[in-house]
Image (tube, coloured by chain):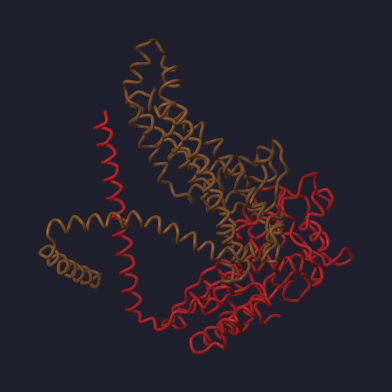
Chain colours: A red, B brown
Amino acid sequence: MIETDDKARRGTAWIAALLAALLALAALTGCASRTAGDTARGAARAIQNKGSDTLVNVALAWAEAYQKVAPDVAIAVTGGGSGTGIAALINGTVDIANASREIKSDEIAAARAQGIEPVEFVVAIDALAIIVNHHNPVDRLTLPQLADIFTGRITNWKEVGGRDAPIVLVSRESNSGTHVYFLEEVVRLGDPNNRDIFAAHTLMMPSSVGITSEVSRNPNAIGYDGLGYVTAEEKVIAVARDASSPYVLPAVETAADGSYPLARNLFMYTAGQPSDEIAAYLDWIRGPEGQAIVKALGFVPVTEN
Amino acid sequence: MANLNDFAKARTAQIALRVRPMGIWLRRGRLETLIELLIRLSGVSTIVIVGLIFLFLLREGLPAFLDIPLRQLFGSRWYPIEGFYGIWPLLVGSLVVTAGAIVIAVPLGLTTAVYLGEIAPVWQREILKPLIEVLAGIPSIVLGFLGWVALAPIIQSLGAPTGLTALTGSLILAYMALPTIISISEDALYAVPKEYRDGALAIGATQWQTIWRVVLPAARSGLAMAVMLGIGRAIGETMAVMMVTGNAAFIPDLGLDLPLHPVRTMTATIAAEMGEVAQGSLHYNVLFGIGIVLFVVTFAINLVAGRLVGSVVRRRGGQL
């Protein structure tokens, strides 16, 4: 009995070892061919681009389209959140940090301590959509109502004209620029002296998709996301500045003319004034070609504001 | 690819060069001393590495305990971007999720092991054992995804306000710990000498009495080890938990519906926030501080469990 068991075990181990070896081989060949391809194309310069998840899809589209404009510049795009991107810029691991909020004063101080002077570029404008489930009868809210909801002062949908059901708050993690923007403009209603924060029972999602999928399957959830991320699975709420203002739905037009109250700039930051390839890339992004991509992905071009 | 081959050839040549003179130089006695030394080094290095890790944790994490008043550090609010560094909700979150996983996984794992080792006919064993070993090979992120897509809606339909709860995390972790618990418990049962069973059956004990009174007590230390390793896997798991527990840093009220609240675990907090912090900032130190707390908690659990097992052994006169 012991022998057969041992044999069986040894057999499994052999198969596992074989599989592992095959995988390792596959990985090696993959790497080797990729490096070979890169040298063949003669990539002169790689630009590291990291940060905001709101911007990541646009940044990827830019990087892809820019390959045709400047084939010798390789651009690597990663998400992770605005805070993540800015931290990477401060730690010197990226060339361009994407952010859906302005850089904070303590981040500027931390950068200067590392001998880095962050330079800001506005690259797009985004309307922040408030989303709920399609089964939720509520379709309009004012900013003060949203503040009460997200600080936990209002906990039941019936208090804002909905069903008698608990409100489930869904937010991005605090490393998200969208989170910080929402905190400042909605939770604190743009008042710098207001120290309110999100209710403790707020669900913190590590990604934009986390928010949209929770909202699309939970009839009591409310969340926020960049308009570019909202799909037909979620219902968009019309927002008013206060009870006496008109309720406006987020859209490229309403964000551009300023009638939608939650429109914000999206940024790219570089370490010091950019030069050469990075400067050319940023100019291209803010030019007609780059801004056409912005519009195609549901964001608002800078030039239209 | 050509480069890689050249590199491999060059490397083989290098190794050959290095080995050949050594063979001449080393006589048998010296070789043995050398091998002994290497074995000793590899043994000691484990301890040294653990020590270094702990020192590193202390260096990066201690400032958190010195700079933040303890009252605030163990406060009930975690919102680091505004300076709220209360790690109490995170500690509670980790404990609730892990305790839930233990409650689910231990009975299930032990009974499965007993069935496999003592009751199941050989043909069933031969189907079930490899399947369980396959379970162990499922990457945790895949389980997390499964929990997020399939399990969370089920939990929500049970009446919870959201499907992303401590219970969802516990179920995923339990599933993750099960293969470890089953495999090691089964080995422990297997190690019980056949004579024990024969003896018990010979004096007229039923199969159930044999298992409950003889085999299980005899395998006790191995079973405890199985449970410990299973728990170890559960408490340190990060990504899967981050996906399914909702990550809300608040302390749910004690009650029957406790597992149906979202929680934020220590591991998920470190994983979610480590990328954003500037190195050397207070937030960075606090995240390492959480690492220290996690280390201490795990160490304490191991210590207590070790004592428990030890005392059982002593009470039974060392006869297992």
Asked whether, in this view, residue A20 is left or right of residue A98, the answer is: left
| Residue that lies at the very extreme toward the left in this rendered image | B24
Q: Splitting the image into 4 quarters, where does residue A265 fall? A: bottom right
Classify B107 as above or below B100.
Answer: above
* Residue at (60% x, 85% y) in the render: A117
Q: Position of residue B152 (x, y in %)?
A: 60, 44
Q: Position of residue B94 (x, y in %)?
A: 60, 48
| Residue that lies at the very extreme toward the right in this rendered image | A244
Q: Position of residue A96 (x, y in %)?
A: 54, 79
Q: Nearer the viewer, residue B71 or A196?
A: B71
* Residue at (63% x, 50% y) in the render: B91
Q: Splitting the image into 4 quarters, where does residue A110 fall? A: bottom right
Classify B189 as above or below B62.
Answer: above
Q: Nearer the viewer, residue B27 or B253?
A: B27
Q: Position of residue B56 (x, y in %)?
A: 50, 64
Asked whether, in this view, residue B21 is left or right of residue B294, the answer is: left
| Residue that lies at the very extreme toward the top in this rendered image | B204
Q: Nearer the viewer, residue A285 or A156?
A: A156
Asked whether, in this view, residue A29 is left or right of residue B318, the answer is: left
Identify the image quadrant of the N terminus of chain B: bottom left
Tally of numbered tags: 0
Identify the image quadrant of the C terminus of chain B: top left
Asked whether, in this view, residue B7 is left or right of residue A75, the answer is: left
* Residue at (64% x, 80% y) in the render: A108
